[in-house]
Structure formats: structure tokens, C-alpha cells
């Protein structure tokens, strides 16, 4: 460990007992109670604070000099300290199949076809376990403490993928909190399988979900969408389950108003999350404003996936993309709609890149969506906002919470954005985590692959 501050903090935490961390900064949006009284705030909404650690928890947060204690002190030299973050929308079952899955061409239809072929050929219990575990190991090494994953739950596969998820959730208990939502083409909710799937999900404490397109089709108009929505809402109400849907992941699609009206029709305000909603940004201003007002009335929570949607949307061979594929975050937040940023796919046909790193996802979201000048409360989009949507306890620093946080080599948010923070120091339950992202070799070994010897 070459960083002197990292060494001093590691030694101080290992010694046990109370510890007062001074001279640190954290965005007020990532503090459970906001900036404490008297804490100086800079123009980007970052507060100067100090933390008292006791019994693996944060005993108190205060303005500099605000805590009267005899505890040993350690200055962090003005560095940023962030909570562990939350990924409210990913796909652990799809991940890390690059090099195995057929080529997709980087398009949405190509990704759907390639994933289907990979799923049929390979998605067995052990394969799912290996890849989910790899993805979670990546997330842990980057300071992600809670994840909601969508699980492909096609007929004949639902029991397998949900069984694997249940096993991996138990294995990772205490390290990463996990939730799951069923993912099927929306016409599946009109089949006899719908009841069986709802029971599988309920048995695992999950959420009902789906993608607002028909099997084998693209996002767009579904003639029977209102009837299908009524069916899935009824199944959810009978089992007291929340919903998390993939909605309008295309340049032109119109399912979001139907989802909002179904939410109001069934009295499910505050219990429905919609991911993607790409086409919302391309509506004429008046129509967009009306749709946003309806979303607000229905109490929908929306999650944008900026890196993946920039990768997939408006991709045409030989042509530069003309739009970004992200929802209108500024307008939604101004209207009072709860919005979060999430990572989505990782090294699969829907997104060839990524590493389950929510800090990196947030950094990219800032640049893609212009969440800066000033940053304001945008840091909450990767912490407090997704935690509130999912009901996770992670995503913020607060008195009484576990001492789970990241110490970053950044003294301002522009510095945090400028570098990938690959030297971040992770602390969980008051102890330094000495971990690194897993080697890709572990995936190769799990698949029984060999690498030819170099001549």
C-alpha cells in the first residue's frame, strides 16, 4: 500500500475503538440527513464534515469541530468520502458472455437475437452462478453495496434462473444486498404461464416486470398493452408485489403513458419503476411535459441507463448517431419525479463494456446528461435516489448506519470526474476491504476454455 493516508487509515481502523475522521468532504446529497448544521458547502453542493466511527458504525456526522470526543483523530486531508453506491437496474444473468455469445453488431435487435442464442445454449445453473458471482465480485471491488437485477424468466427457464439467483443472494448476504425483477416480453403476461411466473417471483420475494414489446419484436405499439398491463397489475396486487418494467427503449414508442394510467387505475402509485424511457426525450415539448405530468401523478420512479442506451440507440452502420438515447432527466427532476442512474448490462450483447462500477456510471452520466455546472444534488442519482426507489439501506452516510464508505483521491467533484478513481479505498463495517476486481481468467477457467501457448 503506497498511499500514506491509506496506510494510516488502515492502521487506525485495525486498532479498533472509536475513531474520529476529520477534514473530509461529501456531497450533501449523499448524506442521509443532508449537510449538518454549520457545515460549509461549496458551490457544487459538497459539505465539509467529520465522522465519528464506533462499533463498525457511523456514530455521528457533524460540521468540522462539531463533535466533542476523546477519540483518536485522523485527518483525511480534505478528500472526498462517499458511501457505497446502489445499482438499481442491471442484468446479472446476462453478463460477461462477450467472446462466447454470437456477434450482435451493437444493435438492439442484434443483441436480442445473440442473447437468445446464448441463453438457449448455455444458461444452466452452474453457468449462471459463475457469471453472477463474477459480476458481484466486480461490483464489490468498486464499492457497490446494493443491486436490483432483472432476470430473464422465459417459460421453461424461470425456475432455473430464479433458483440460481436465490443461491447467489444467500452466498453474498452481508456483502451486497440483492433484489430481482422478472423480465419477459410483455405478451407473456397474457399466457397461461403468467400465473406460474408470478408465483415463482413471489416465492423469491421479487418484483414483477417485463419489457413493453411483444416476443421477438421491438419497442413500439402493442395493440393489447392495456389488457396486458391490467393482467400484470392484478397478479402483482394478488401477491403484494411491486413492479419494475423496461419501457420505451427506442426512438419512437408510447408505452409510458399506458403504464402511468394503469398505475393510477390499480391504485399502485409509488410502487412502479420504469427503466429506459428513451423515446420520452424525443417527444414535442408540449407532449413531453404532459407525459411527465402523468408520470408524476402516477408516482412512477424512472431509471436512466446512459452508457447502455448511448451504445444501442441510433446505431446504424456507417452513420454517426444523432441522439443520446437518455431520458430527459432535468425535466423529470424539475417536475418532482424520482429519477436514478444505473448501470444496466455488462459485457454482453446489449453492452460490450462495463465493470459493475456505479461510480464510473455516475461519472459518465454527468458528462452525457450535463449534470454539472453546478453538480448540485446529482450525486444522489447513484446513491440516495436508487436506494429510495428500491428500499435499500445503502447509498448514503448517516448516523447509525454501517461504516461503509469509499475514500477517494479527489478534493473536488471536477477532480473526481476527471480520473477513474481506480485507487479508491473501500471500507466496510469499519474495516478496509483488501480486494481487487476478479481476473477475466476466472471466467475462462469456469468455461473450461484454454489459451494457446505463445510460440
Image (tube, helix red, strand yellow):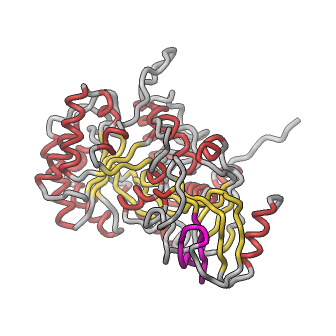
Q: Name the residue furthest right.
A: 455
Residue positioned 76% across, 43% down in the render: 451
Q: Is residue 25 left or right of residue 399?
A: right
Residue positioned 22% across, 67% down in the render: 240
Question: How many numbered dots are placed on residues in this image?
Answer: 0
Q: Is residue 246 left or right of residue 371?
A: left
- Residue 42 pos. (x, y %): 54, 51
**Magenta residues, start to end:** 49-65
Is 129 or 124 nearer to us in this picture?
A: 129
Residue 161 visible in the displayed image: no
Image: 444 above or below 349: below
Is 312 or 167 nearer to us in this picture?
A: 312
Quadrant the N terminus occupies: bottom right
Residue positioned 18% across, 43% down in the render: 294
- Determine if the magenta segment contains residue 56: yes
Q: Name the residue furthest top.
A: 318
- Residue 441 pos. (x, y %): 71, 51
Quadrant the C terminus occupies: top right
Residue 251 visible in the displayed image: yes
> Principal SS element in the magenta part?
strand
- Residue 245 pos. (x, y %): 30, 49
Residue positioned 56% across, 50% down in the render: 359
Is 361 or 45 nearer to us in this picture?
A: 45
- Determine if the magenta segment contains residue 214: no
- Residue 414 pos. (x, y %): 60, 42
Q: Is residue 257 left or right of residue 69?
A: left
Amino acid at each position: 500500500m503506497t498511499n500514506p493516508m491509506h496506510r494510516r487509515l488502515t492502521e487506525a481502523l485495525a486498532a479498533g475503538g472509536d475513531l474520529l475522521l476529520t477534514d473530509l468532504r461529501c456531497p450533501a446529497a449523499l448524506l442521509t440527513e443532508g449537510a449538518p448544521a454549520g457545515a460549509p458547502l461549496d458551490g457544487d453542493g459538497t459539505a465539509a464534515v467529520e465522522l465519528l466511527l464506533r462499533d463498525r458504525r457511523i456514530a455521528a456526522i457533524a460540521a468540522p469541530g462539531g463533535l466533542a470526543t476523546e477519540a483518536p483523530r485522523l485527518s483525511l486531508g480534505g478528500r472526498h468520502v462517499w458511501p457505497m453506491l446502489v445499482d438499481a437496474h442491471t442484468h446479472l444473468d446476462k453478463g460477461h458472455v462477450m467472446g462466447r455469445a454470437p456477434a450482435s453488431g451493437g444493435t438492439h435487435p442484434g443483441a436480442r437475437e445473440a442473447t437468445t442464442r446464448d441463453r438457449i445454449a448455455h444458461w444452466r445453473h452452474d453457468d449462471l452462478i459463475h457469471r453472477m458471482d463474477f459480476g458481484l465480485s466486480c461490483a464489490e471491488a468498486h464499492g457497490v453495496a446494493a443491486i436490483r437485477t432483472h432476470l430473464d424468466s422465459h417459460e421453461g427457464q424461470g425456475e432455473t434462473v430464479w433458483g440460481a439467483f436465490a443461491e447467489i443472494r444467500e452466498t453474498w448476504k452481508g456483502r451486497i444486498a440483492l433484489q430481482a425483477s422478472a423480465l419477459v416480453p410483455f405478451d407473456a403476461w397474457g399466457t397461461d404461464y403468467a400465473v406460474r411466473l408470478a408465483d415463482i417471483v413471489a416465492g423469491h420475494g421479487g418484483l414483477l416486470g417485463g419489457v413493453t414489446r411483444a416476443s421477438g419484436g421491438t419497442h413500439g405499439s402493442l395493440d393489447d398493452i392495456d389488457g396486458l398491463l391490467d393482467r400484470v397489475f392484478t397478479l402483482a396486487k394478488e401477491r403484494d408485489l411491486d413492479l419494475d418494467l423496461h419501457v420505451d427503449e427506442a426512438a419512437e414508442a408510447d408505452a409510458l403513458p399506458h403504464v402511468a394510467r394503469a398505475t393510477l387505475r390499480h391504485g399502485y402509485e409509488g410502487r412502479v419503476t420504469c427503466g429506459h424511457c428513451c423515446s420520452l426525450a424525443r417527444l414535442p415539448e408540449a407532449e413531453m411535459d404532459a407525459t411527465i405530468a402523468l408520470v408524476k401523478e402516477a408516482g412512477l420512479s424512472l431509471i436512466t441507463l446512459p452508457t447502455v442506451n448511448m451504445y444501442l440507440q441510433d446505431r446504424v452502420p456507417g452513420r454517426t448517431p444523432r441522439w443520446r438515447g437518455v431520458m430527459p432527466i432535468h425535466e423529470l427532476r424539475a417536475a418532482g419525479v424520482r429519477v436514478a442512474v444505473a448501470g444496466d448490462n455488462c459485457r454482453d450483447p446489449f453492452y460490450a463494456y462495463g465493470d459493475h462500477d456505479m461510480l464510473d456510471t455516475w461519472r459518465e452520466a454527468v458528462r452525457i446528461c450535463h449534470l454539472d455546472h453546478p453538480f448540485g444534488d446529482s450525486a444522489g442519482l447513484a446513491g440516495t435516489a436508487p436506494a429510495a426507489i428500491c428500499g435499500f439501506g445503502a447509498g448514503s452516510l448517516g448516523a447509525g448506519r454501517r461504516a461503509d464508505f469509499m475514500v477517494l483521491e479527489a478534493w473536488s467533484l471536477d477532480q473526481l470526474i476527471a480520473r477513474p478513481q481506480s485507487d479508491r479505498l473501500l471500507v466496510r463495517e469499519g474495516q478496509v476491504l483488501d480486494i481487487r476486481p476478479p481476473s477475466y481468467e476466472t471466467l475462462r477457467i469456469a468455461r473450461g476454455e484454454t489459451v494457446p501457448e505463445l510460440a
